[in-house]
Image (cartoon, grey):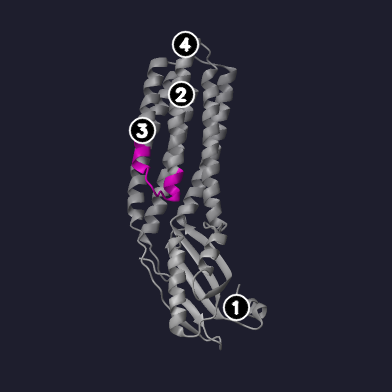
Amino acid sequence: MRQHESAHAHDDSHAGDDHSHGRGHSHGGDSTSSRKLAAVSLINVVGFLVELAGGLAFGSVALISDAVHMLFDALAYVMAFAAAHVAEQYGDGERWSYGLHRLEPFAAFLNGLLLLPMVGFILWEAYQRFLEPVAIGTGPTIAIATGGLLVNVGSVYVLHGDAMSLNEKGAFYHLLGDAGGSVAVIVSVLAIEVTGIRVVDPITAALIAAVVTWSAVTVLRGSGEIFFLKTPLESADVRSHITGIDGVDRVDDFHAWQICSQITVATVHLETGVETMAEAESVVARVHDELARHGVDHATVELSPHYADRDVYLDTHCH
């Protein structure tokens, strides 16, 4: 369970009283996420071994490329599973303020990096086969690629849901790329069988590399936004809603960021004209409710009364 941080209401002498306004937020989805990623990891390791053996046996660089894609995906899923499992075991505590949930974007970032050398390998192999095309075993290659496609579809079914974690999204994008790769292999082999143009195989491999690059950029961007504290909220919209709450005269300072894709944190400093502690507590409670409606899990709300020299106060208290 996660608790909202205490909100602080300051009186004219700047003395602060804490007002806890807690709400529980369960991380029960972490366990489900771990199980999903573990299942997908196992499925893809098996798929990699089958596709690699088939690609080497029947001479398809496109199939080998798809197998390598599946291998790196399997490694990525293992890392994502490990991150989700560790984060689940080490919940919020005094030593780790938000547990180890930062492992989620960290693992996702590493997953994205793992895709980049794979792109280089695929392009190099495709270039070699473009210069020296080889004969491909049509029937067995199609059968193996179809099996790989079924593996991808099954994995997508396991992962898909309304609210996926960042690691699950990363795995999902990997799987879509894998599925597209398997389809491309099947189409390319059929095209070679019909036309006899063998360079279709390395061209298909290059197209798979393009899909892999897109996957890498997507995952790197998503994890990078969390690490560099990009706000996940529409700040102007949140400020507008908070300002509309009775007792709130001005939103002086507002910040929101994410610990991981499932935990959003915010701090807000407000100017108010309320005069009693009961009124202040009521304002703080309504602000917490509004932030929760915008998806904030942990919030710190600070109230201050009107000051004649407002700029001096902000320079002293808002950072």
Whether residues under marks 1 and 2 lie with C-beta atoms below 8 angstroms apart, the answer is: no
- Name the residue carrying label 4: 194
Tally of numbered tags:
4
Q: Is the residue 251 above or below the residue 116 in the image?
A: below
Q: Earlier in the sequence, mark 4 or mark 1?
A: 4
Distance, label 3 to label 4, CA atoms, is 27 Å
Asked which quadrant contains residue 297, the reply is bottom left
- Name the residue carrying label 1: 317
Residue with the most extreme bottom position:
13
Distance, label 4 to label 2, CA atoms, is 14 Å
> Which disc, if any, is residue 185?
2
Disc 2: CA contacts within 10 A as few (<14), some (14-19) or many (>=20): many
Residue at left 39%, top 56%? Answer: 86
Nearest to the observer: residue 288 or residue 230 = 288
Distance, label 1 to label 3, CA atoms, is 56 Å
Identify the element where label 2 is drawn.
helix
Whether residues under marks 3 and 4 lie with C-beta atoms below 8 angstroms apart, the answer is: no
- Name the residue carrying label 3: 151
Residue at left 57%, top 17%? Answer: 132
Q: Quadrant of the C terminus?
A: bottom right
Amino acid type at circle 3 is Val
Amino acid type at circle 2 is Val
Q: Which residues are magenta?
A: 151-170
Q: Earlier in the sequence, mark 2 or mark 3?
A: 3
Nearest to the observer: residue 280 or residue 26 = 280
> Can residue 6 be seen at all in this image of the molecule?
no
Identify the element where label 3 is drawn.
helix
Amino acid type at circle 1 is His
